[in-house]
Image: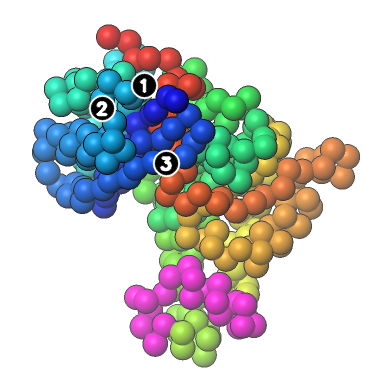
């Protein structure tokens, strides 16, 4: 039996796990990230929580094939520098050098969204497929692409930033600094922004009742709950949200023609109330849908374990970092 070590690095928690060759997580450990600390302190904890996961599995480091890490950034293969991670304030950091001080294993690093879609294809909702596109609809919009059971992120591994593809010319300013990104219209942050603006001009909505009259308590769940209960404003907001999401996804279908589209993140918890109309709108808005059909849009099933499993198996889809 071969064993792989995965680490999912988030702004809140560091979650490490040992995964066997059948994609079963056999141990899991976590530490609070405390992202404001120095890179030395955080990378030390990344190694520490990973060692603890190996210990919990009853294994030694010599039993581990490799260490795969999913991070909210990517590594420039020409320089081996971690490009930019907003959560940590890291920019052009020699992250492999820091990690090597604390843990000696073959190490692979990829964007966390790429790890999530890879995990779903290896062991989750898309395990019967070879080609998939995934969007994570949360505070931002993460994106990942798998082609022929391997992560695709462009020749320099810095592509597949699907949340930052352009949806509206000169549209709403995105956190990345550009305007009109998919993330600016299809993240939970975007839906909350749109809802807060709408309740100002349309009083009496169930939305405000559900959040106790406090606009600051509006979240994606509140909006979808109100829509399910027939609130007119909420239904309009959800319909507009789904229309924007369908427009973005239809572009990815036209370019990549995957077998399946996977949705993760908090918004995806709306289930069929989101998926049914989304699939219908996609059929209406996607090139040649009436001739060749469209791939189904399904909900991710592994939750946070997808990123952990995908990270653990990065050695199967990435070349080793150059010295």
Q: Magenta stretch: residue 246 in it?
A: no
Segment tinted magenta in the rendering: 211-232
Question: Label 3 belongs to which residue?
Answer: 25
* Real-space CA distance between mark 1 and mark 3, rounded to the nearest whole angstrom: 15 Å
Sequence-wise, which precedes: disc 2 or disc 1?
A: 2
Q: Dot 3: within a 10 Å radius of its alpha carbon, few (fewer than 14), some, or many (20 or more) residues?
A: many
Secondary element under disc 1, as helix, strand or loop, is strand
Secondary element under disc 3, as helix, strand or loop, is strand
Point out the residue furthest to the top here: 323
Q: What residue do we see at 27% from left, 20% from top?
A: 62
Figure check: 174 above or below 197:
above
* Real-space CA distance between mark 2 and mark 1, rounded to the nearest whole angstrom: 11 Å
Give the percent coordinates (x, y) of residue 255. 67, 32
Sequence-wise, which precedes: disc 1 or disc 3?
A: 3
Q: What residue do we see at 67% from left, 35% from top?
A: 129
Figure check: 310 above or below 198:
above
Point out the residue furthest to the right here: 291
Give the percent coordinates (x, y) of residue 139. 40, 56
Q: How is the image coloured?
A: rainbow
Question: Label 2 belongs to which residue?
Answer: 60
Q: Which mark is residue 104?
A: none
């Amino acid at each position: 039996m071969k064993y792989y070590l995965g680490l999912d690095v988030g702004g809140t928690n560091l979650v490490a796990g040992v995964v066997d060759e059948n994609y079963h997580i056999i141990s899991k450990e976590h530490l609070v990230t405390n992202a404001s600390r120095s890179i030395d302190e955080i990378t030390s904890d990344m190694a520490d929580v990973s060692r603890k996961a190996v210990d919990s599995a009853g294994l030694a480091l010599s039993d581990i094939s490799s260490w795969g890490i999913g991070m909210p950034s990517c590594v420039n293969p020409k320089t081996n520098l971690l490009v930019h991670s907003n959560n940590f304030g890291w920019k052009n950091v020699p992250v492999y050098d820091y990690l090597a001080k604390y843990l000696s294993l073959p190490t692979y690093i990829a964007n966390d969204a790429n790890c999530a879609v890879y995990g779903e294809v290896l062991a989750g909702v898309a395990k019967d497929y070879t080609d998939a596109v995934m969007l994570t609809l949360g505070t931002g919009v993460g994106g990942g692409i798998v082609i022929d059971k391997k992560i695709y992120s462009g020749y320099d591994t810095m592509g597949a930033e699907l949340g930052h593809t352009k949806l509206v010319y000169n549209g709403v300013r995105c956190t990345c600094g550009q305007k009109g990104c998919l993330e600016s219209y299809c993240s939970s942050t975007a839906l909350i922004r749109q809802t807060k603006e709408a309740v100002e001009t349309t009083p009496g909505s169930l939305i405000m009742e559900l959040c106790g009259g406090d606009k600051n308590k509006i979240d994606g769940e509140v909006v979808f709950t109100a829509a399910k209960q027939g609130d007119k404003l909420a239904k309009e907001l959800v319909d507009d949200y789904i229309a924007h999401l369908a427009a973005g996804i239809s572009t990815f279908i036209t370019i990549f023609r995957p077998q399946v589209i996977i949705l993760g993140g908090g918004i995806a918890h709306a289930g069929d109330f989101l998926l049914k109309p989304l699939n219908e709108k996609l059929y209406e808005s996607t090139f040649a849908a009436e001739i060749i059909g469209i791939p189904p849009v399904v909900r991710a099933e592994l939750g946070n374990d997808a990123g952990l499993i995908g990270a653990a198996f990065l050695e199967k889809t990435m070349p080793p970092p150059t010295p």
